[in-house]
Amino acid sequence: MKNKLHVVGIQADLVWENPSENLKYFEDIITDLPTTTDLVVLPEMFTTGFTMQPNNLAEPITGSSITWMKKLAQKFDFAITGSLVIEENNKFFNRLIFVHPSGKIDTYDKRHSFTLAGEHKVYTSGKELLTIDYKGWKIRPLICYDLRFPVWARNTKNYDLLIYMANWPITRIKAWDTLLKARAIENMSYTIGVNRTGFDANNYQYSGNSIIVDFLGDELSSLEENGVGTISAVLKKKNQNKVREKLGFLNDKDAFSIDF
């Protein structure tokens, strides 16, 4: 078990539906990250922005963007995660990809489609939660709109880190700020939220507000509104476990099942 995990999130002004430009931007930043970095978190649909036109943008699971992720993970000996537009069996998915330094891939399909934007009409929603084992840490990765649904994030598997990646617009940024801390507090888990900034082709504005908080909801790292760059924190599992054991809140949680 590794007690400490150095996590970095990259907040970017995504270039609309332009994977090559976005990959170049992220690679330039990643190249300069500290050698102690264990995990890099990118925004939702980090190669394209939140597009509802996947036909000419979707990639297979063996596509160039995942090859790029594998290359960087192996070169810098860290894990990297973000969501992409993926095509599989003639269906489109908003799919989170988690690449280990070894090249191993874990995937999660966004469960809660953002119906306000018609995402449910374009992308197939997932039905499976993912818990990733990485360097002795259990990680629960989720995507954007999933943040509004606390049952889906409930810490029934004793995970250590909760991840949200998003294209969350400025008009509802108060919910983003509030719910990230709520999810951390109720699940007694380190939580990182990585959002984009700038404007997309639909003229929706994104302010970023990426943040890392601890298991009590206290801020560890954040970016100024509308800024670009990184958030970074060294997470300490022993500290989290000590507080969980002392307070015992997770022991008192309700049992439940999820129907589809």
Image (cartoon, grey):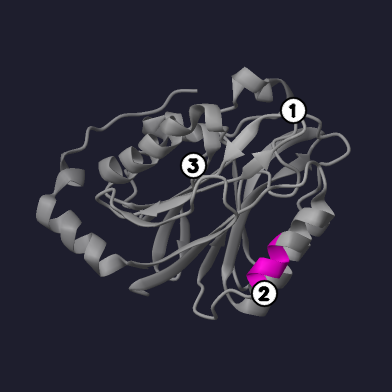
Label disc, if present, on residue 129 of the rendered structure: 3
Q: What stretch is highlighted in magenta?
A: 26-31
In front: label 1 or label 3: 1
Q: Residue at x 82, y 34 (%)?
A: 90
Characterize the magenta stretch by its predominant secondary structure.
helix
**Is 28 situated above or below 145?**
below
Q: Residue at x 81, y 31 (%)?
A: 53
In front: label 1 or label 2: 1
Instruction: Specify the amino acid type for callout 2.
Output: Thr
| Residue 113 quadrant | top right
First along the sequence among labels 2 and 3: 2
Query: Residue 253, position in %: x, y?
Result: 21, 37
Residue position for label 1: 202
Spatial CA distance of label 1 from label 2 is: 31 Å
Spatial CA distance of label 2 from label 3 is: 31 Å
Q: Which residue is drawn at 37% across and 31% down?
A: 151
Label disc, if present, on residue 34 of the rendered structure: none
Q: What element carries label 3?
A: loop
Residue 20 in the figure: left or right of residue 202: right
